[in-house]
Image (cartoon, rainbow, N blue to C red):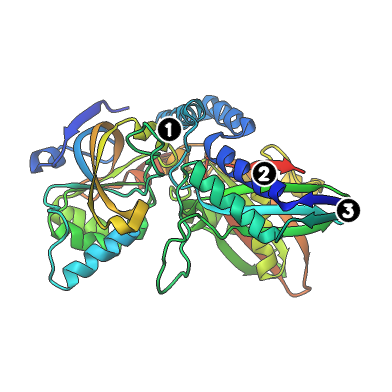
Amino acid sequence: MSEIKNITTPLTEDVVRNLRAGDFVRITGPIYTARDAAHKRMYEALQRGEPLPFDVRDQVIYYVGPTPAKPGEIVGSAGPTTSGRMDKYTPAMIEQGMKGMIGKGLRNQDVVAACKAHHAVYFVAIGGTAAVISQSIRSETMIAYEDLGPEAIRRYEVVDFPAIVGIDIEGNDVYGIEQAKYDKLK
Amino acid sequence: MREIDVKQVTDAVAKCCVDSCYYLPDGVLTRLEQAVDKEESPLGRQVLDTIIENAKLATAKSVPLCQDTGLTVVYIDIGQDVHFTGGDLWDAINRGVARGYTEGYLRKSAVDDPIFVRKNTQDNTPAIIHCRIVPGSQVHLVVLPKGCGSENMSQLRMLKPADGLDGVIQFVLEAVRTAGPNPCPPVTVGVGVGGNAEQAAELAKYALARKIGEHNANPQYAELEDKLLALVNQTGVGPAGLGGTTTALAVNIEYAPTHIGGLPCAVIFNCHAARRAEATL
């Protein structure tokens, strides 16, 4: 088991260069939430030549649609959603300078290629552990597309957000590497 | 004849929605704890520990286990001697969903039309309701909040009779491998065999409505459930898909008579948060 690497956002080239698929990380700093509908809108804005609602350069986007916060809580339950649904939009976001993504599940080859070409990193959080993950979220600010409700873009300030490097800048994929070790049918 | 006010149905559905999203069934938690001891991957054990910690934290704080509180699947078995009063039964079920998701601070994940507008209905209705008329004078409800990460990995294949048992086994394993990390393993694998295309899918989903630990009543199918569970856990997918020997907690099979020319087979997954609540009126 590798040691835990503490990293801060926005990400820098020095940080992402030292991350390898399978590394445990704790992320501290601002991250931005966006999932299906917000990605579709941002993608369409880019196609029309319009600016994105926030500057994504060096930023990390977290694929999440939280539950509503209960009274007295900062956020509701806020675990990762399946990243593959964002694959269609992701290379364009990476080309805009986005440096990191947090989600769960498989990515397609276009995303892997964009991570390699532009030195972006895909972090994996453990799906279905939203109550635990929410403890690392210290504040929430509405940024854009408020009408999308749980799919609106929010900025979270997180402290020690737990994740694992899923795809590194060389294109290594933690899922493929780890699953192969325990595949007893091949 | 027994009269039941539909308000009782609304109350029961609302409570089931909230309880199922906050509190993991005891049997599922026990399975997860047993899995930690058997898991070969150190990373896999760590993932399982986090999943268990999450379930306990959600219970302690009465908050949703997962942000995806799903579309709401409701199974309602109605005794044929029951007469509902006080309004429309389907409306009563949907009012229960709306109240549970609103008052329980659950995420509203339903959109009205799938292609053009995709406007959120704001209260997670409509529920997906499966109704059976059964003997007796009771009403039994099972509420299954079903997230989309697992649902999106569903598969239906119209196998040929010649594909037989081996065809079913290979199809299930292929579905598990293709799904990989996406349905949040360790999963429950629901398998529907026989009937026709839509019945196989309904059976696969109904298999997920079972309490964990229950087997098919037919010994041959019960044996196949154990065999498939062992095979699924040799695929290497592991907890969260990050490798290991705990890919599924259970494989549940439901079957139905089918056509001489067919062997329909559907696979639908439930995530490790195998949420379920029931009520009897």
SS at circle 3: loop
Are callouts 3 and 1 both on one chain?
Answer: yes
Tell me which chain the residue with mark 1 is part of.
B
B69 vs B236, nearest the viewer:
B69
Asked where in the image residue B156 lies, by quadrant, the reply is: bottom right
Q: Tell me the amino acid under the disc marked 1.
A: Val
Please determine whether, in this image, residue B268 is positioned above or below residue A13: below
The residue mark sitting in front, 2 or 3, is 2
B163 vs B273, nearest the viewer:
B273
Asked where in the image residue B100 lies, by quadrant, the reply is: top right
Could you tell which of marks 3 and 1 lies nearer the N-terminus? Answer: 1
**Residue at which label 1 appears:** B47
- Residue A162 visible in the shown view: yes
Q: Is residue B44 left or right of residue B273?
A: left
Q: Identify the disc placed on residue B135.
A: 3
Badge 2, how many Cα within 10 Å: few under 14, some, many 20+?
Answer: many
B257 vs A62, nearest the viewer:
A62
The residue mark sitting in front, 1 or 2, is 2
SS at circle 2: helix
Please determine whether, in this image, residue B241 is positioned above or below residue A89: above
The residue at the point 40 percent across, 39 percent down is A77
Q: Tell me the amino acid under the disc marked 3.
A: Pro
Residue B32: percent from the left, percent from the top? 55, 31
**Residue at which label 2 appears:** B12
Residue A179: percent from the left, percent from the top? 42, 43
Question: Gap between marks 2 and 3, in whole Å?
Answer: 21 Å
The image quadrant where one finds the C terminus of chain B is top right
